[in-house]
Image (tube, rainbow, N blue to C red):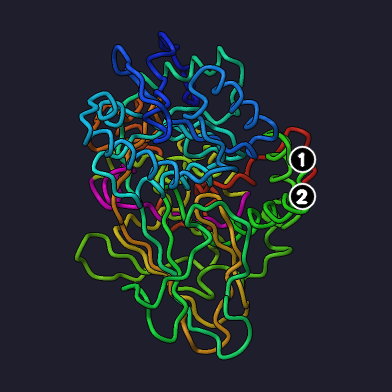
């Protein structure tokens, strides 16, 4: 069985750098207005997290500022994207009132570039979504983190980039010729009863990016607020996960905060991630992960398959240790937990995973040994559902906490200590526009050619195994970064 080989990206002509530069007076209201012969063909606003990728973020900022207008390259450690975009929008509106056609053309054709990890990219996506602009700019992502799921999903690769001028010019050329793809965004509500005693904030604070994913408390005037409860809300574009994979991610983030000097490049980070997976027992779950911590022992999962439909409870097998609700075809470093159901599945229950169909895929995993099968062609997790809304109800169990993460950002979630119930509900919120390069992994309903060469029937005869045959060794499961062992670890010595 031959594995699909990803073809390299064809270089696109960058052209003159003037095609990408935005004049100072458009970016800053205090700058002197100048005459420009013509509007740039592809004006870009660049956001870079200087703390991502070790020293790569700072180096990338330096190169972009050498090639473009310094004011159009923003260091996210110094200025938040919402402040930048709001200032730009207000200034463009002022110039529009003054009859400046050039400023309006730049605003309408502007593209955003964000360089950082998935948390950084999600932060910018959230800001663009929240601003509710009449013409929101499309976004290209530069892989500068550990997993880089967002860039990988849209053809920008997953390896940290070179930071020299030629590499940046090549990327600018790709951005100019990239196509636009809309993707679904998802709203997440977490509601838990306010404690009668103890700390007011039930979730221990984490130093996460400002990407909504640390969950902020809603105010008393918010329509989602319920008296007597703490209600948190956030949003995501790629995935929400719960269980052992999130526990490994939490351990990784905690260790990185304690010892930042040990996490200065992508390869080292991925190796540390896999080692933590071994240490935490993800590969030997029966030894360190009691069955009482498996998802069905403390949670019910309900789905609404269509808008306005009714809730259905999913029957989750007792051995499930992790559940992932995934929107894009890249989870934990490029693995696709849903896979591509063939015609046999399309004609029955499941369909291909489009990123703009208003549905999110729900997948279950037993442990990493099953997940290793995903590294083979056509491997996938245990497909549980495709849904428009998902509801998790957590009840009192043997364990007092579990772990969760949204688009790479993990937290430790307390569980009920009495007969109360904690609820998490995920619902479709809207769409944002991404820039896609070839080969693009994400499939769009509006672009039939975006299926990157997959044959809808390719999986037809490879998925004949009944999904309910749990004890059959042929079952395919998948997907967590911890499934990928670093090169220096010998799989023969893991037993």
Q: Quadrant of residue 225?
A: bottom left
**Residue at 63% from the left image edge and 69% from the top image edge:** 204
Report if residue 460 is visible in the image.
no
Left or right, residue 225 beside residue 5 = left
Instruction: Compare residues 384 and 82 and report the one nearer the observer.
Output: 82
Q: Are marks 1 and 2 in contact (CB under 8 Å)?
A: yes
Q: Main secondary structure of the magenta part?
A: loop
Q: Is residue 486 above or below residue 425?
A: above
Q: Quadrant of residue 440?
A: top left
**Residue at 33% from the left image edge and 40% from the top image edge:** 89
Residue 371 x %, y %: 57, 47
Label 1 environment density (alpha carbons within 10 Å; few <14, some 14–19, many ≥20) = few
**Which residues are the magenta region?**
347-368
Q: Is residue 460 above or below residue 65?
A: below
For disc 2, the marked residue is: 495
In the picture, the disc for residue 461 is none
Left or right, residue 41 beside residue 9 = left
Residue 162 x %, y %: 61, 21
Left or right, residue 468 beside residue 163 = left
Instruction: Compare residues 395 and 29 and report the one nearer the observer.
Output: 29
For disc 1, the marked residue is: 492
Label 2 environment density (alpha carbons within 10 Å; few <14, some 14–19, many ≥20) = few
How many numbered circles are shown?
2
Q: In the image, is residue 202 part of the stretch drawn in magenta?
A: no
Q: Is residue 166 above or below residue 204?
A: above
Helix, strand or loop under label 1: helix
Q: CA distance from mark 1 to mark 2?
A: 7 Å
Q: In the image, is residue 352 part of the stretch drawn in magenta?
A: yes
């Amino acid at each position: 069985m031959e594995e699909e080989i990803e073809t390299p990206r064809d270089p696109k002509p960058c052209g003159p750098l003037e095609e990408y530069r935005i004049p100072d007076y458009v970016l800053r209201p205090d700058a002197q207005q100048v005459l420009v012969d013509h509007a740039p063909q592809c004006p870009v606003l660049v956001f870079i997290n200087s703390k991502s990728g070790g020293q790569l973020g700072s180096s990338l900022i330096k190169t972009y500022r050498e090639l473009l207008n310094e004011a159009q390259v923003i260091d996210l450690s110094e200025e938040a994207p919402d402040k930048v975009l709001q200032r730009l929008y207000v200034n463009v509106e002022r110039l529009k009132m003054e009859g400046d056609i050039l400023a309006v053309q730049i605003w309408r054709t502007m593209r955003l570039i964000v360089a950082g990890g998935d948390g950084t990219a999600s932060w910018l996506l959230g800001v663009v979504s929240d601003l509710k602009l009449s013409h929101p700019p499309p976004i290209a992502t530069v892989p500068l983190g550990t997993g880089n799921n967002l860039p990988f999903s849209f053809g920008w690769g997953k390896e940290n980039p070179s930071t020299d001028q030629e590499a940046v010019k090549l990327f600018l050329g790709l951005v100019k010729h990239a196509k636009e793809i809309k993707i679904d965004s998802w709203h997440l509500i977490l509601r838990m009863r306010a404690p009668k005693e103890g700390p007011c904030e039930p979730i221990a604070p984490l130093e996460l990016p400002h990407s909504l994913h640390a969950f902020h408390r809603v105010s008393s005037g918010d329509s989602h607020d319920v008296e007597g409860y703490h209600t948190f809300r956030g949003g995501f574009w790629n995935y929400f996960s719960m269980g052992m994979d999130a526990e490994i991610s939490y351990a990784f983030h905690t260790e990185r905060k304690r010892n930042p000097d040990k996490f200065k490049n992508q390869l080292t980070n991925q190796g540390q991630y896999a080692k933590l997976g071994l240490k935490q027992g993800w590969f030997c779950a029966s030894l360190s992960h009691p069955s009482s911590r498996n998802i069905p022992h403390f949670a019910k999962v309900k789905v609404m398959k269509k808008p306005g439909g009714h809730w259905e409870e999913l029957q989750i097998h007792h051995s499930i240790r992790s559940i992932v609700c995934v929107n894009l075809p890249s989870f934990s470093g490029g693995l696709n937990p849903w896979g591509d159901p063939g015609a046999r599945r399309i004609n029955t229950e499941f369909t291909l995973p489009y990123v703009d169909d208003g549905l999110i895929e729900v997948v279950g995993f037993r442990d990493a040994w099953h997940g290793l099968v995903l590294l083979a062609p056509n491997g996938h997790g245990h497909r549980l559902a495709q849904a428009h809304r998902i509801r998790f109800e957590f009840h009192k169990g043997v364990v007092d906490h579990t772990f969760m993460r949204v688009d790479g950002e993990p937290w430790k979630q307390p569980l009920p200590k009495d007969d109360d119930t904690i609820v998490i509900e995920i619902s479709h919120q809207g769409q944002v526009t991404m820039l896609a390069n070839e080969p693009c992994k994400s499939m769009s309903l509006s672009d039939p050619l975006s299926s990157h060469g997959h044959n809808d029937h390719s999986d037809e005869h490879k998925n004949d195994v009944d999904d309910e045959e749990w004890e059959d060794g042929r079952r395919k499961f998948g997907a967590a970064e911890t499934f990928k062992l670093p090169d220096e670890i010998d799989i023969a010595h893991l037993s």
